Image (cartoon, rainbow, N blue to C red):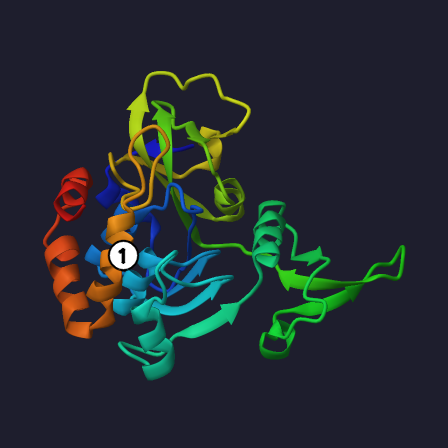
Amino acid sequence: MAKIVSLKEAVAENVRDGDTVAMEGFTHLIPYAAGHEVIRQGKKDLFLIRMTPDILYDQLIGVGAARGMKFSWGGNPGVGSLHRFRDAVENQWPRPLEIEEHSHAAMANAYEAGAANLPFAALRGYIGADLPKVNPNIKSVTCPFTGEVLAAVPAIRPDVTIIHALRADRKGNVLLEGIVGVQKEAVLAAKRSIVTVEEIVDELDPPSPNSVVLPSWAVTAVAEVPGGAFPSYAQGYYPRSNAFYIAWDEIARDRDSFLKWIDENVMQAGPDDFAGHAKKVA
């Protein structure tokens, strides 16, 4: 059953050095506040998983928290490269980074397999693609009923999944609405989970047709963190900060300017006022 705790406590109790960590959110509800707390607490040797690593994973890679990453697309969306990601791959700074690249479809299916406690996912994909030549975790299986050859990838089973959501009630049930990506599957596939939310309410709104409710029994920890998805957006709370994504290109391009930004905006900031951080850098 979910415990309602502070963000600091949630990360301290559930993210451990060497863990496989998934932080999901597709354009919407990316868990930046939680990622910053992971950096502040000095977690290390993490194997990161994310369908679309963008600025948040650029930050985690740039501070040396990551030993590797499984992903299906990496970049600063609408802007260009992730410079800290590139520096780690091309120059091993601040440390070498193991990478495992997949397609979006394979990642989504692998999360679903993990949520169903299956060992692997089978899909129609990778036909004519070059990724199987460089990724030994893309294999093939033959259907015992039709003889069709299908692609197969290992199930994703994170040690901990971290997501941001809109609301939770006081029992720890969590509501997501809008673009929800693979958050549900990523939480159900994980051994432990942290959900940050915009607010904790007495009762959740009746779910709309495009919503997901994660029951309290599926979640380990819930922390109230207003603004916790900034600079991504939270439907009904605040818009995406396109200006920040543009600004990040220059901030992260140079090692010194990146480290200065991390020191001023993450290390010297506190987990209890992420909304204040968002106003400062917006």
Q: Is residue 15 above or below residue 4?
A: below
Which residue is nearer to you in this view: 202 or 180? 180
The C terminus lies in quadrant? top left
* Secondary structure type for disc 1: helix
Residue 41 visible in the shown view: no
Q: Residue at x 64, y 69 (%)?
A: 138
Q: Residue at x 33, y 46 (%)?
A: 31
Counting from the top left corner in percent of width and height, residue 65 is at: 29, 66
Q: Quadrant of residue 199?
A: top left
Residue 159 visible in the shown view: yes
Q: Residue at x 14, y 46 (%)?
A: 270
The N terminus lies in quadrant? top left
Which residue is nearer to you in this view: 131 or 249? 249
Q: Residue at x 48, y 39 (%)?
A: 180
Position of 52 compared to 16: left or right? right
Number of marks in the rendered image: 1
Q: Is residue 43 above or below residue 241?
A: below
Category of crowding for the residue at label 1, using alpha-carbon neighbours closer than 10 angstroms: few (below 14), some (14–19), many (at least 20): some
Q: Is residue 101 above or below residue 6?
A: below
Counting from the top left corner in percent of width and height, residue 36 is at: 24, 52
Residue tagged 1: 246
Position of 226 compared to 217: left or right? left
Residue that lies at the very extreme toward the right in this rendered image:
146
Amino acid, disc 1 = Ile
Counting from the top left corner in percent of width and height, residue 247 is at: 22, 57
Which residue is nearer to you in this view: 235 or 145? 235
Residue that lies at the very extreme toward the bottom in this rendered image:
91
Counting from the top left corner in percent of width and height, residue 34 is at: 29, 47
Which residue is nearer to you in this view: 81 or 140? 81
